[in-house]
Amino acid sequence: MALEPWLIAPVSAVASLLIGLFLYNYVSSKDAGTDRMKQIAGWIQEGSRAFLKTEYTYLGAFVAVMAIILSVALGVKIGLTFVFGTVFSGLAGIIGMEIAVKANVRTANAAKNGGLIAAFPIAFRGGAVMGLMVVGLALFGISIIYWLTGDPETVLGMSIGASTLTLFMKAGGGIYTKTADIAADLVGKVELGIPEDDPRNPAVIADNVGDNVGDCAGSGADLFDSYVAAIMAAMILGGTMQIAYLQTLPLVFAGLGIIASIIGIASVRVKEGGDPGTSLNNGTYITCIIFGVLTYAVTYLYGYDIKIWYATVVGLLAGIVIGMTSDHYTSINKGPAKKTAEAAQTGAAINILTGFSYGLISCFPAFLGIGIGSAIAYSLYGVYGVGMAAVGMLAIAGTIIAGDAYGPIGDNAKGIAEMSELGDEVVDITDEIDAAGNTTKAITKGFAIGAAGLTALALLASFQEIVKDLLQQSISFNLMDPIVMMGIFIGMSVPVIFSAMIILGVSKNAHRMIEEIRRQFREIPGLMEGTGQPDYNACISIATKGALKELLPLIVFTISTTLIVGFVAGIRALAGYLSGAIFSGFFLAILMANAGGLWDNAKKYVESGHFGGKGSDTHKAAVIGDTVGDPFKDTAGPSLNTLVTVISQIASLFAPLIVAYALIGV
Amino acid sequence: MALEPWLIAPVSAVASLLIGLFLYNYVSSKDAGTDRMKQIAGWIQEGSRAFLKTEYTYLGAFVAVMAIILSVALGVKIGLTFVFGTVFSGLAGIIGMEIAVKANVRTANAAKNGGLIAAFPIAFRGGAVMGLMVVGLALFGISIIYWLTGDPETVLGMSIGASTLTLFMKAGGGIYTKTADIAADLVGKVELGIPEDDPRNPAVIADNVGDNVGDCAGSGADLFDSYVAAIMAAMILGGTMQIAYLQTLPLVFAGLGIIASIIGIASVRVKEGGDPGTSLNNGTYITCIIFGVLTYAVTYLYGYDIKIWYATVVGLLAGIVIGMTSDHYTSINKGPAKKTAEAAQTGAAINILTGFSYGLISCFPAFLGIGIGSAIAYSLYGVYGVGMAAVGMLAIAGTIIAGDAYGPIGDNAKGIAEMSELGDEVVDITDEIDAAGNTTKAITKGFAIGAAGLTALALLASFQEIVKDLLQQSISFNLMDPIVMMGIFIGMSVPVIFSAMIILGVSKNAHRMIEEIRRQFREIPGLMEGTGQPDYNACISIATKGALKELLPLIVFTISTTLIVGFVAGIRALAGYLSGAIFSGFFLAILMANAGGLWDNAKKYVESGHFGGKGSDTHKAAVIGDTVGDPFKDTAGPSLNTLVTVISQIASLFAPLIVAYALIGV
């Protein structure tokens, strides 16, 4: 076994973890600044830990129950790998959060002392820790499971563990962050007229914590989950084929992807007067090129079928196309954002309608990318080609996550600079770092959605293979079969209802926090004057518990609907159900991410002095659009990918029982 | 032939037309009131005619070009039946508009002289003219074509003619009405501070015309198109089966549906102190029951398979369920509207998010209704069962359209009462008539969308039958076939882009009209003081031409995308494409109709004195939600049904050429 090519996977995974640790120490070794800065950073750190602690306590119970159910229903092996997956995914979340709350204050301090050149590497390397740790942990975990069992279907257990935890982290973090954001703004800015990020506001720390738990830990975990799911699906599909190397090839390519990501991350530098945004994008392009070259070389050396390489590259290209069009539809310098800002001149309604319309239009290139990309990949190498296209898209996840996690670090650095009163110059530098983060964020989101879409298709294909294997006969899911069609309609409902309930959850939870903020201003003497000390933890606790309270029933609803459809209406309905969830989930994910990003940037465009600038009626209209977009882009939208992944994997996992016991048979 | 059962269709169609004419004369014979009322009604009538004239001129050219293309590509017979369909659909539009502009002023006058008891019958019988004429013309037209050719596939030509015209009327009327509405409000109410429906506002007549061309003519034509399509699809499906009576059975049941509608319409009465809303709903229930009884009797007498009757009733029930849940999610007295109004207290953004969320949730019962309804219908009698379920849903269209067309008549009556200064008491009566219209409107919209969804599934099934017939072999559209999947993703884009472009079109067109209104106030002396005469026609002309200008490229885009997908990627891609269009089209149609209706009623709830009432900040927030909802519910949403119907029929029509010439074969 010693010389098998797939061992590149654990080797590069360990390398990734070691480099991640090295960068972690690099960031930690920097100075955290003045006492005031340390104090504020301490509050954020404490709040973030408090959130994670509460969340993980609840999750521990949930995971234990799930593990017991899975062990009883499907065997102890699945139960154990499930727990294994949740632990690895949870670890990725903790590390991401820890490094983010260290890097933010150090970035602010470096901006104060050394300017952009000193600050940028800290912010980016903080993000890189997250990126490298996520892919390192994921690939290392898969390697261990595969080494122990030799069976990709046990990797499914790990993958579903990771996905379930991700769903909690993304959706829970999403509710948390918008709860705090909306409540802090409404009472602070609107009712009391105190500025944003004012330390007198009891919700201000919760708001900053939200950036970490929602954006940073959440999106790291998101790609963790798609990454594991894509590799697992391709391995299952490879296992059904006649050629031996196909089962482990996804591991080989993923290992090469990590090497490419390490080189790409190392190449990101900003010179004096340089533009951080360009550097970040160059890092992504370099990673892509190196990944292409390395996989081509390995394909050539080991004599793999070149068509598989083509399929992998098709996936990578589709990811780039979707990312770039997301950028076009959301970027502050492009037509859609400017036109949406212009529309705000005729009021909030027209601003919202315009942004919503462009959000709808932005779905078209993504639909084309996924539709045509998967069709080409299939024509090259069947369903395995589709699986490898998903792997190709996700292989560069290390670099993508690094760029993504960089965003909230910059955002927090700006907040700390403002709260610690470091002066306009420092705030401007952190602003520049933050702005570059917004561009990469748009690209990353498009990329993550595209990857999830392709992964979902690969999961659907692997579901079919598992069913075929169980039935010992081929099965087709015909669109004209009314059981399939009924499944599609019910499946379409799940992301739709999930989005609705989670948005309503934010609004309910924000109301709870608003009451608490008002109570503190009423009851704590001297709070408004700056002499009283607000109870930050009370707000943090409300945001945390409320988020989990809104979320748990939703996740139970999702899992049980999937099982009900399967056990009542059978395998064909379930295939339709999965497809329906992909259709509406993919659509809503893109719409919400892009419309939300667009409204945000339209508001920023107005704030930068256009159409009357800050404080004008146009600005007020644009702010309303931005607030509508907040839960779209930061709560509902990003959870949908994971929701679809969870559903697909639950279906695959329970396929044997459903085939055996469903009311409506095959 | 004389005694064949299907002759009930032309006989009841002629009866329907005669009763319609009788009611037309009844309404016309009433007094139109004072000179001032006649003058205002004259302006609306003139404007409506001007709109129709311009639209029909453009449409004439479009229809001619299409007829030539169809004749060349598919034979003169199809070209001719296409023209026949457009003429019948166009005629239904003209009649609907003519009666609406007569009934509105007469309703207002009757309210003045005789109160609710005198006014209600005029408004409702005005609506009934529309309902009876639409179903009468449609079924008479189908009967003629079928009598001449004996081939349901030539009815397809007529059906597509009707659908194309409907798309123009609904989408064009939708752009028109919201253009005028938004422009009149923004300049009149916001900039100049003059009240709504003030005759000094040059856009005021266009606004009232909009109610007629958008709501009245548009939605009559909508059901015309679904009605014809459903009957035609069921006839095609019946023609492929072994049992002879199945091909004409849809005509028999449709004929019985007309008889049930006539009785149901005749039963609608309001007593002194009675509630018009209850009467309208009772009329619908009576129609349903009579339809059920008549079809059961005929099934028993002629020995038809009872399972077909069950399938028909399943369709009817699904329509009622969808209509009733739409009512729950939009009605002013129910939880969702109240909670959305309550959310407006925390500002426009939360109001919009809450309404949007409930709109999303409201899709669930509709998805279940269509999904489970079609599966049950299929299990009863295969694809023919699905076709007959659609016929069952649409058979009572006469009553449904009557209730729907009643709405804008009441709305206009209220406008005329206000503009003619008939006093508060009269306005209150017309208000009550108007309010009852809003309830029926919600039910009707849900019903129309459900009917269109089921019809689209029936069309998809007939597409498959046509292809099977052409290939002389069975063909399956497998979800795991990547060509089908690619088709689904591209098909999903079409309603998405159509919605976006049409909303952007409203906003562009409103800007044009705003400029014109400002110009008139600037240049016409004494306009603001009430001594100058505004140029109403200039605004009407801008609304009309702009609507067509925004629309034509969209329709060409839709038709050509359908043909490109078919001819490039073949029949399987096209089947996926049709399904994808159904998925996203059905979803967006329900979401937009219900969210739009909900915001409207949430605003009305605030206006009725809750949460601060008219003029409060809550009210302002609710108005923003309502404005966002306007193009949702009156422009984009209602066009989507027809869009999907047009696409499905184009695909069926061109199937022979696509099978023969597509780049990617079967």
Image: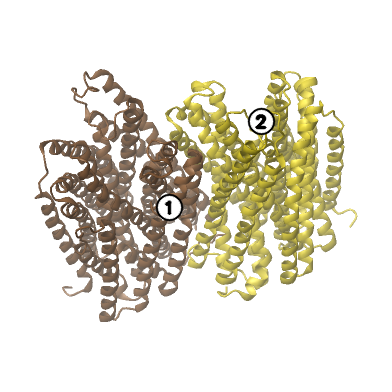
Chain colours: A yellow, B brown
Residue type, mark 2 in image? Asp
Give the chain letter at badge 2.
Answer: A
Q: Position of residue A466 (x, y in %)?
A: 67, 66
Question: Which residue is at 30% across, 70% downward?
Answer: B247
Q: Secondary structure at mark 1?
A: helix
Is B431 or B222 nearer to us in this picture? Answer: B431
How dense is the environment of label 2, judged by Cα within 10 Å: few (below 14), some, or many (20 and up)?
Answer: many
At horizontal 25% and vertical 18% (from top left) the residue drawn is B523
Q: CA distance from mark 2 to mark 1?
A: 41 Å
**Tag 1, which chain?**
B
The residue positioned 61% from the left and 66% from the top of the image is A563
> Which disc is residue A15 wearing?
none
| Amino acid type, label 1 | Ile
Task: Tell me which corner region of the image, top left, top right, bottom left or bottom right, holds residue A513.
Answer: top right
Query: Is residue A204 visible in the rendered structure shown here?
Result: yes
x and y, in percent, of residue B77 in the image? 26, 55
Of residues A394 and B48, the one nearer the viewer is B48
- Residue B365, compared with residue A315, is above or below; it is below
Same-chain status of marks 2 and 1:
no
Residue B590 tag number? 1
Q: Nearer the viewer, mark 2 or mark 1?
A: 2
Neighbourhood count class around disc 1 (C-alpha, 10 Å): few under 14, some 14–19, many 20 upward:
many
**Relative to B492, residue B367 above or below:** below
User: Is the N terminus of chain A in the top left, top right, bottom left or bottom right quadrant?
Assistant: bottom right
Q: Which residue is mark 2?
A: A197
Residue B285, how many percent across, how many down? 29, 66
- The percent position of residue B131, horizontal first and vertical second, equals 23, 56
Q: Using residue B212 as the reference point, say whether residue A518 is left or right of it.
A: right
